[in-house]
Image (cartoon, rainbow, N blue to C red):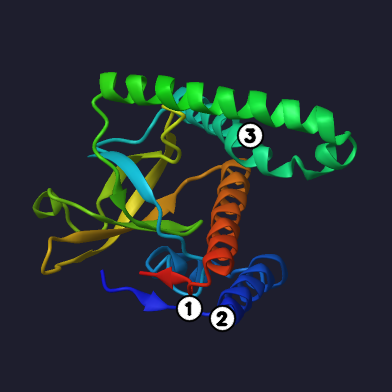
């Protein structure tokens, strides 16, 4: 994957177009079908984190009970990953000394969670993290076993979004394209059959991740780099 530079302005413009498309332009049946096979990274907010991924081909549909379990587990995970960003209101209502103590305790708990998470990930034999391209609609990732995949294959995909949390965000995905690269094949997938709540949480997570990258680029005076 060759990196291409995006400006802050372009990133914001893409986000605005995305919001307008979702909330103000209802899809027709034909448009919805066409969208299934469109590039899920094009004209959407895209982040390039390092993630551990685990996938398998889906030979038969999941049961209702499996869907329900995945739905609930994903919500519990995302409530932890995303809600942590909303601590600003709490901080503004507390005095400085209290906030210092809370931040020290939070740092210790985070470090403990990292240690526990790393140990549990090792026990689960989770693959090593790789740089991927992630949007709220899909994912592009390097794949050593791409020869076993075909376009339109359905996958059961586990994404370990944070190393300190050994729980994966689980989704079904459809293979849109297999891209041969000099350094190895890459697979582009579109997420499928996410519940409305799961999709909303994933939207928030990707936006949060993008916001972190923007803040980091400003702090280090380096341009945003996406793949």
Up/down of 74 relative to 188, above or below: above
Task: Determine whether label 2 and label 1 are within 8 Å by CB.
Answer: yes
Which residue occupies 9% across, 54% down? 147
| Number of numbered discs visible in the structure rendering | 3
30 sits left or right of 157 in the view: right
Q: Nearer the viewer, mark 3 or mark 1?
A: 1
Residue 85 falls left or right of residue 226: right
**Could you say which is closer to the camera, residue 51 or residue 17?**
51
Per the model, the C-alpha gap separating discs 3 and 1 is: 30 Å
Task: Using the image, determine if residue 188 lies above or below residue 59.
Answer: below
Residue drawn at point x = 60 percent, y = 62 percent: 215
Expressed as whole percent of the image width and height from the top left, the position of residue 190 reads 39, 57
* Label 3 environment density (alpha carbons within 10 Å; few <14, some 14–19, many ≥20): few
Q: Tell me how far mark 2 sits from mark 3, CA to CA.
A: 29 Å
**In the shown orientation, is residue 45 left or right of residue 148?**
right
CB atoms of marks 3 and 1 within 8 Å: no
Please name whichever residue, 14 or 130, is drawn nearer the observer in this view of the structure. 130
Q: x%, y% of residue 82?
A: 62, 41
Is residue 167 among the parts visible in the rendering? yes
Label number found at residue 26: none
Q: Distance between the residues labelled 2 and 1?
A: 6 Å
* Disc on the earlier residue, 2 or 3: 2
Residue annotated with mark 1: 6
The residue indicated by pointer 3 is 79
Residue at image coords 55%, 48%: 202
Circles 2 and 3 in contact, beta carbons < 8 Å: no
**Residue 206: x percent and y percent?**
54, 54
The residue most toward the front is: 97
In the image, 114 versus 18, the foreground residue is 114
> Which quadrant is home to the N terminus?
bottom left
Label 2: which residue? 10
Which tag, 3 or 1, sits closer to the chain's start?
1
């Amino acid at each position: 994957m060759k990196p291409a530079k995006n400006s802050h302005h372009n990133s914001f413009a893409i986000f605005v177009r995305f919001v307008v498309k979702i909330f103000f332009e209802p899809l027709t049946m034909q448009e919805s079908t066409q969208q299934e096979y469109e590039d899920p990274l094009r004209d959407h907010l895209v982040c390039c984190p390092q993630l551990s991924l685990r996938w398998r081909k889906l030979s038969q549909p999941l049961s209702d009970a499996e869907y329900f379990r995945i739905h609930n587990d994903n919500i519990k995970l995302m409530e932890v990953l995303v809600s942590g960003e909303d601590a600003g209101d709490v901080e503004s209502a507390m005095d400085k000394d209290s906030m210092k103590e809370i931040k020290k305790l939070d740092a210790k708990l985070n470090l403990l969670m990292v240690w526990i998470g790393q140990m549990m990930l090792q026990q689960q034999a989770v693959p090593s993290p790789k740089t991927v391209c992630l949007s709220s609609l899909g994912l592009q990732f390097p794949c050593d076993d791409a020869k076993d995949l075909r376009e339109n294959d359905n996958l059961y995909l586990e994404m370990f979004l944070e190393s300190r949390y050994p729980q994966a965000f689980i989704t079904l995905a459809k293979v849109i394209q297999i891209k041969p690269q000099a350094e190895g094949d890459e697979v582009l997938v579109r997420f499928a059959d996410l519940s409305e709540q799961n999709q909303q949480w994933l939207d928030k997570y990707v936006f949060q991740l993008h916001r972190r990258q923007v803040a980091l680029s400003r702090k280090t005076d380096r341009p945003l780099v996406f793949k």
